[in-house]
Amino acid sequence: MSGTGSADERKVSSLRELSPAIEPPRDLWPQIEARINAERRSAPAAQPRPARARAVPPRWLAAAAVMASVAVGVWIGRSLLPAPGPGVQSPGSARASFAAAPTALDVAYVSDPRYQRDRAALMKSLQTRLAALPPAARAKVMASLAAIQRAKQDLQSALGKDPGNALLQELLVNTYQDEMRVLTDIHAASDAGRGI
Amino acid sequence: MTQAQAEDTRVDWEAALVQRACTGDTRAFERLYREHAGRVYGLCLRMTRDAHLAEDCTQETFINAWRALAGFETRSSLSTWLHRIAVNVSLAKRRKASPVAPSLDDEQGTGGACEWTLETPVEVQEIEAAIGALPEGARDALVLHALYGYSHGEAAQMLGVAEGTCKAQLHRARKLLRERLNVEVG
Amino acid sequence: MGFSRLAAAMTVLFASAAACASGDKTFERQVPAEAHGVVDISNVNGTVVVSGWDRPEVSVRAELSEGVERVDVSTDHGRTTVKVVQPHSGHGGEADLHVQIPKDSELTVSAVSADVATAGVTGVQRLNTVSGDITAELGGSDLELKSVSGNVKLKGHGQPARLHVSTVSGDVHLEHGAGELEAGTVSGTLVVSLDSARSVRARSTSGDVHFEGKLARGADFDATSVSGDLNVRASADAGYAYEVSTFSGDISNCFNATPSEHGHLPGHTLQGTRGDGAGHLRLKTMSGDVQLCDRK
């Protein structure tokens, strides 16, 4: 079997002693989740689900939809790439083919128009929203936003050197999602401060 | 806690996760994925003999499972249900990769009761390589019956063949393994 | 009087009278409440202390500083609302609320600069603050706690619960938790101790994550950070399989296992199994350091 190279060196006296389970060489969940979220976004009524007992505030639905759109961007980005090898290593051929376009992955992540629109709306009102926060909170939040910005830059820079790196891709998606979460939290927090 | 009690607890916990996943809780579905990914991937890998294809099969299996989760009867075994999906996906992917269908096995044989014991112990790597070298039909039947513990009838149903054909494939698998490993398989 | 008109009258009856416009003042009100009803509390500035009791009523006591307009307490169809009302313009004041609620109530607290503390509440809790701190006793099965810059401090009793905690810059401290935990922060520090973990998902951007606890059989543990460090001390009766990945951080462990490099590409990976390997533990960072050891 190609690419398996079982490392199990024990001897067995029966086929039934073989372990049925073989762990995938890399974590497949992020891509599965991205596909699920993409399908949910495109056809929310197609899957019959019992109603949730607790109503979800509209702003969290919006945030969830945005995160789903980022996930779609990830799925699209990953589907354009050859599958990376085990762990964080990417095949040499992937590096060669994407060495000339280090920003291609970044473009794929944020190319979803709905994500761009929602993020732009949140960024537009960011300064006003920050001003509505208590001063100490405002300073801490700005520091956190700066941390997110640095994380994005560091990850994009690292991905430029190793574009097929699944670990970096996952962390970058997490960072985009966290940025949206923070922007949405600031939005809600400033509304609360106004007593709405 | 006895083995049976532990299994009951596990099934209850799994049923609760399925219910939560049905409401759209992807975290709960992720838990199910983590629990079953190894066995599903192992099945896909042994059927397709290709790591990249096996990854695709595993992903398709869980995505199909997500879509069909509302129709899953929590009384049944989730593991078996996932394996059925995985077998279907693997067979489809394999057909797409090599459209020429292998000829049906004419070999007669009951493939009867066999514990798949080896006369002398053999290294796991060697056995896996021998299984991987088996013809597709024989390999599929062997993996489902000997490794995953499905009965002849269950394995046949999953593979879409008659039970007699499945038994014949198992008989063939046993014979080929005996030749390759140079040990008696009983 | 028809039932609906009576209900409307009762709602108005329990609304607070306007308080005096100046000077510190106290406020007290009790209203009947369902044992499994909903209680919503909102306060912009001050403190909110909530405790659960066995009585079918909500009791509100408040110390209000100058500038607070009033406290509204109303009840309608099983939902009790307690709201500190600030003036629309000008500076508001501080309100220190002490609220006692039926312990199985579903509790929601929304605060801005108010610290929130709960104890003895066994129903669902949803506690949100902007800059206030949250201190909660884990008594129920479902808790969601969010703060932007406030710190979150939780104490459990080892009873399983579904716990969701998120902050932007606040720290999170959890001790004696159990069950399922989802915790996220951007730059805060996560310090988590679980008596029994079935599922843990911890995420940070630059904050450090410290975990110490026991993994239940078949548990799933996922911790990721971009630049924060991950420090995990875990034990599991049924063991766990671990996978540690970092792009440019260091990996250290107490098992004498050697991380593997990826040839000419950056990154380290450490994989292995402890005991029977029934659980799964995954640690991932870009530049943060990772340490994995057994829990003593």
Image (cartoon, coloured by chain):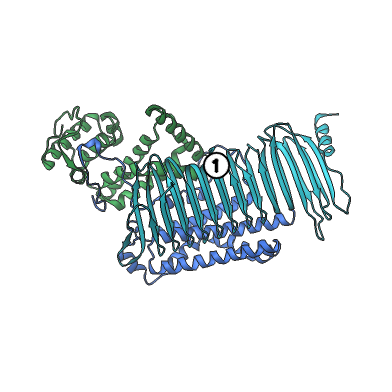
Chain colours: A blue, B green, C cyan
Horizontally, residue B73 falls left or right of residue A20, namely right
Classify C238 as above or below C263. above
The answer to whether residue B175 is seen in the rendering is yes
State the image coordinates of residue C25 (x, y, percent, origin top left). Answer: 85, 49
Q: Secondary structure at mark 1?
A: strand
Q: Which residue is label 1 attached to? A: C162
Residue C36 location, quadrant: top right
Near mark 1 (Cα within 10 A), the count class, few <14, some 14-19 or many ≥20, is: some
| Image coords of residue C233 (percent x, y) | 44, 50
Question: Is C163 located above or below residue A91 in the figure?
Answer: above
| C188 versus B34 height, above or below | below
Q: Determine the residue positioned at 39% across, 51% down.
A: A28
> Closest to the observer: A163 or B31?
B31
Q: Residue at x 88, y 54 (%)?
A: C22
Depth check, front residue: A175 or B103: A175
Q: Is residue B73 visible?
A: no
In the rendered structure, the answer to whether residue B181 lies left or right of residue A90 reads left
Q: Is C192 left or right of C276, judged from the image as shown?
A: right
Percent x, y for residue A26?
36, 53
**Residue at image point 80% right, 55% down:** C93
For the point 78% across and 36% down, the residue is: C31
Q: Residue A109, image x and y in percent?
A: 47, 61
